[in-house]
Every structure is written in C-alpha cells, then in structure tokens.
Image (cartoon, helix red, strand yellow):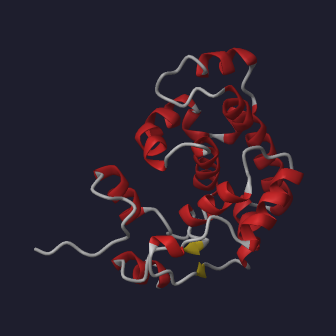
Amino acid sequence: MKEKKRCAWPSNDVLMIKYHNEEWGVPLHDDDKLFEFIVLDGFQAGLSWKTILNKRESFRKAFDYFDPIKISKYTEGKVLELLQDEGIIRNKLKVRATITNAIAFLKTKNEFGSFDNYIWQFTNHKTIDNKVKTLSDIPATSAESDEMSKDLKKRGFKFVGSTICYAFMQAAGMVNDHTTDCYRYKDVSEGN
C-alpha cells in the first residue's frame, strides 16, 4: 500500500508523523487544549518541536494536565519542584511564565466568555488558508500573529512573541500551512 503524501517536516519520526496527521492544523476550539498549546509553544522557544513533543506527556503530568486554575496557584515550592523534573524543559523563566500565563489566560477567558472567543478573533474566527506549496513558503510570522502577540503581551502573557504566536496559530488550525500536496491540506480545508 502506497503511503499518502504529507508535509516534509515530520520526516520519518513516528511521533511527529502522528502529531502532523492527527493534530497539527486542525481547528481547535477547546480552551484547555488551547492553553496546553500556548504553554508548549512557549517552552519550544529556541528549541525544536520534536524536543517538546517527546516530553509532552511529562509536561502534562508535571503541570497538572495543563489545568490553568491549578497552575495559577503554584507556589515557589512547586516552581522549585518543576525545576528538578528531568522530564520537562527546566527553564526557570519558562516555568514562571507558565504560571503568569495561567493567570492571564483565566482573566482573558473570563472577559471573553472563553479563550476560544478571544484568540480566534485574530483570524476573524476562521482558518486562514495560506495555500503553501513548499516548506520554504511557510512564513515565521504574519500580521495576525504580530497583532496577537502585541495583545497577549498587553494582557500579561509571557513567551508570546510573534514567531511563537504563529507556531501556535499553525498548531491550533488558525492557519492551514499544510503544503498543498499534503493529504491533510484538503482534509483541514474541509474541516476534517
């Protein structure tokens, strides 16, 4: 049986292929998952997505399965505990930013009724289809990610530069950056 053509970036890595095939680019409207993606994309800064994906389960366990209410109440003792956890990225600034972001996330969610309502406004509540032909056609930022970054920072979020916001938009399906020859391109365009 011939394997379907997909984007080149997952290469032959089983976990990356699974992520590409099942999650990346699929429009996401679940607040808990959106928070998880914001946290993970923040931790990715300066690292590869493969590194984060390989530690994802450890991150979930360490950060109470990305429960923003629990995370918003983390103490200094919990921060020190996380900094000893070899299963995650032990970066003090990123760990502290996760707590700050949980607080900002909850405030934003409260203001807009859901984080989904807030975050999708940057793409007018629909997926932007970039119709990219090759990986080199995929931008690192966009006008939308610039605006999102600026607004998130204003709300107190950390590790939300435009490049991180654009990666978040890709992951959450706010942009469809599957290459047009990838079998997932059409699926995502049609909402599957």
- Quarter holding the C terminus is bottom left
Whether 21 is drawn above or below 39: the answer is below
Which residue is rendered at x = 50% and y = 80% of the image?
Answer: 132
Whether 192 is drawn above or below 164: the answer is below
Which residue is rendered at x = 68% and y = 26% of the image?
Answer: 92
Percent position (x, y) of residue 115? 73, 59
Whether 157 is drawn above or below 86: the answer is below
118 sits to left or right of 80: right
Percent position (x, y) of residue 78? 66, 19
Q: Give the image quarter of residue 148.
A: bottom right
14 sits to left or right of 88: left
Q: Give the image quarter of residue 117.
A: bottom right
Residue sitting farthest toward the right: 154
Which residue is rendered at x = 68% and y = 41% of the image?
Answer: 68
4 sits to left or right of 180: left
Which residue is rendered at x = 59% and y = 43% of the image?
Answer: 46
Percent position (x, y) of residue 171? 54, 61
Whether 74 is drawn above or below 113: the answer is above
